[in-house]
Image (cartoon, grey):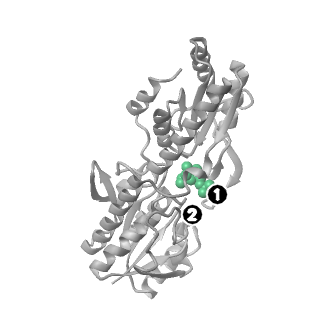
Amino acid sequence: MKVAVLTGGGDCPGLNAVIRAVVRRAAEHGFEMMGLRDGWKGLLEDNHFRLTRETTSGILHRGGTILGTSRVNPFKVENGLERVKRAVERNGIHAVIAIGGEGTLSAATRMSQEGLRIVGVPKTIDNDINATDFTFGFDTAVEIATQAIDRLHSTAESHKRVIVCEVMGRHVGWIATYSGIAGGADVILVPEIPADLPKVAEHIQRRHASGRTFSIVVVAEGTRIKTSEDPSEHLVTTGALDEAGRPRLGGVGNIVAQEIERRTGFETRVSVLGHIQRGGAPTPHDRVLATRYGVHACDMVARGEFGKMAALRGNDIVSVDLSDATRELKRVPKEFFEVAQVFFG
Ligand code: F6P
């Protein structure tokens, strides 16, 4: 039985660990494994190669994906669905394991509704996939962001400055909230709550009035703000669009820093972590989670559990409906964020 695997959307530490686990388990089930290049594009363009124990050896700890990735959505491409169906038939593919985030898994959900045999694996550093406690890659991103905040602390303290650290998080503030709590941030701004910059400035002023000489502000890239130049609530974008046609985010940290300096008079700097959070080796936690997801996804194919996604519930890996996973995004709950707020100002 031939089984194809693809990685779609932004890359993420742990992708290779999933691919390796899928291939190793596939050998036990007697599946022949095929790697699709660059996400759904691999089917649209019939671009793939054989995955074996040899071609997937030594990749457990490596960042990125040996399959390549893209944000191409087959439903937004002319005759995309037909082209995918034809490639599946022509190559005798029994099932597709789609490893991806919101975009890739939404396409996977529709593909499965169109009759293809699909199994999903939840990937994203943003941790915004519903129906799973955690996606792999998130722990690594939080580790990197926390280390960065620790480093910013010592330089902020020495220079008596405010430092704003911009982290990823397009729709949700999981990375900002986790790394902010772990790094002892004095203010955390997330997409779930539009930023109130005058209030942020007050927090910082109150903190400095009580004897502190520096402050750390963590802001997720997808946080909506209002400024004197643009008083409507807005996202900060580069003006360009990504491959999926979404506005490219970036720059909110700079604007937050300018507003803080203008309102408080404290010298303020900004540090944008960007893709550093997505690159490089996964943490041991993510390697284990990714490995468990890969083994489970392969077993799902063997059991004929299609239209489903491997998910983490507590400490168990379970199978959930893809439609539940992609119905809505998993946002930071209010009660969780309130823990972070205890330490503001
Ligand atoms: O993978 C999700 C994400 O990390 C978002 O937080 C971010 O907006 C996006 O990727 C940026 O990805 P790229 O620059 O590769 O388009």
User: What amino acid is at disc 1?
Assistant: Asp
User: What amino acid is at disc 2?
Assistant: Arg
Count the numbered circles shown. 2
Q: Is mark 1 within 8 Å of ligand 1?
A: yes
Seen at 28% across and 57% down, the residue is: 317
Residue 116 visible in rendering: no
The local secondary structure at tag 1 comes to: loop
Examine the image and state in which quarter residue 265 appears: top right
Residue 50: % across, % down? 46, 83
Badges 2 and 1: C-beta atoms under 8 Å apart? yes
Compared with residue 204, is residue 99 higher up or lower down, i.e. above or below? below
The residues bearing labels 2 and 1 have C-alpha atoms spaced at a distance of 8 Å
Residue at which label 1 appears: 242
Compared with residue 219, is residue 240 higher up or lower down, i.e. above or below? below
Residue 310 visible in rendering: yes
Residue at which label 2 appears: 71
Residue 326: % across, % down? 41, 55
Image position of 316 (left or right of 274)? left
Examine the image and state in which quarter residue 260 appears: top right
Seen at 64% across and 32% down, the residue is: 155
